[in-house]
């Protein structure tokens, strides 16, 4: 499949003849299941337990955090843009961590993990790894286990680090307005994403697929 051959950290184009089953077959064992399925349909449901199935604002986050090893790639394909008012936004965590935040913030983030609450459990992941960054939107942040008393970041340090991180994410946004056929694939260890919307749009429908 030619799209996979050119895939880097971010890929965006219109694929009018997108066939989800063809992608699943081509990706094979690289697929990471979403709710037990090779892909899911993201469409608004009045279910507050899963923010992926809603269309109002959902802050910066990583997908698949209920997996021990969250997927590397997220694929979103637009089946119906609805009103067009629900925007997907990305920010390059690779650039932000590499150039835009202070050394003190980077040092503090390296001592933290975020805990995602959902899917009938609580799931912990270090914010920073050799792959990049992961972050839960719904949950909490805490120091990594096993740190000595001297290594523990203070509450003020944690607050300052997260404040700077979110400010940099908010000011370095790539926005994607959906049209039917639009396909966005990104390495979620290098890009954080969020859904920016002030409305509920029950007609908006996306295919969501995860893979490594």
Image (cartoon, rainbow, N blue to C red):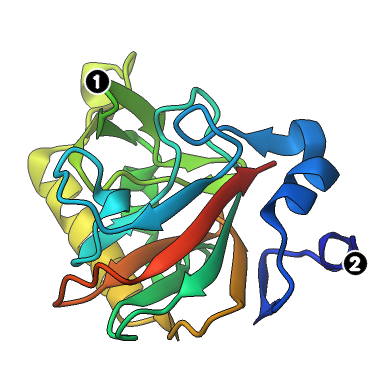
**Residue under numbered circle 2:** 2
Say which residue appears at 39% left-offset and 59% top-offset.
103
Q: Residues within 10 Å of mark 2 (few under 14, many from 20)?
A: few
Q: Residues within 10 Å of mark 1 (few under 14, many from 20)?
A: few
Q: Is residue 147 left or right of residue 197?
A: right
Say which residue appears at 20% left-offset and 43% top-offset.
138
Helix, strand, or loop for circle 2?
A: helix
Say which residue appears at 55% left-offset and 28% top-offset.
69
Q: Is residue 182 left or right of residue 179?
A: right
Above-or-below relation of 175 to 202: below
Quadrant showing the C terminus: top right
Q: Is residue 7 left or right of residue 63?
A: right
Above-or-below relation of 4 to 180: above
Residue 188 pos. (x, y %): 54, 54
Question: In front: 136, or 34?
Answer: 34
**Residue under numbered circle 1:** 120
Q: Mark 2 or 1 closer to N-term?
A: 2
Distance CA(mark 2)–CA(mark 1) = 38 Å
């Amino acid at each position: 499949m030619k799209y996979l051959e050119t895939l880097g950290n971010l890929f965006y184009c219109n694929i009018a003849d997108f066939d989800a089953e063809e992608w699943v077959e081509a990706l094979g064992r690289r697929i990471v299941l979403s709710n037990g399925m090779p892909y899911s349909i993201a469409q608004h449901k009045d279910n507050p337990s899963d923010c992926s199935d809603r269309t109002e604002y959902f802050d910066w986050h990583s997908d698949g955090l209920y997996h021990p090893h969250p997927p590397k790639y997220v694929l979103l394909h637009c089946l119906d843009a609805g009103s067009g008012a629900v925007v997907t936004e990305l920010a390059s965590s690779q650039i932000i961590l590499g150039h835009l935040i202070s050394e003190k913030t980077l040092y503090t983030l390296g001592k933290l993990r975020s805990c995602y609450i959902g899917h009938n459990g609580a799931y912990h992941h270090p914010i920073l790894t050799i792959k990049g960054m992961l972050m839960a939107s719904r949950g909490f942040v805490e120091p990594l286990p096993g740190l000595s008393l001297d290594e523990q970041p203070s509450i003020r340090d944690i607050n300052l680090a997260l404040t700077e991180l979110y400010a940099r994410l908010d000011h370095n946004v790539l926005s994607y307005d959906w049209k039917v056929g639009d396909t966005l694939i990104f390495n979620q260890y290098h890009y954080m994403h969020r859904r920016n919307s002030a409305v509920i749009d029950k007609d908006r429908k996306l295919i969501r697929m995860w893979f490594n």
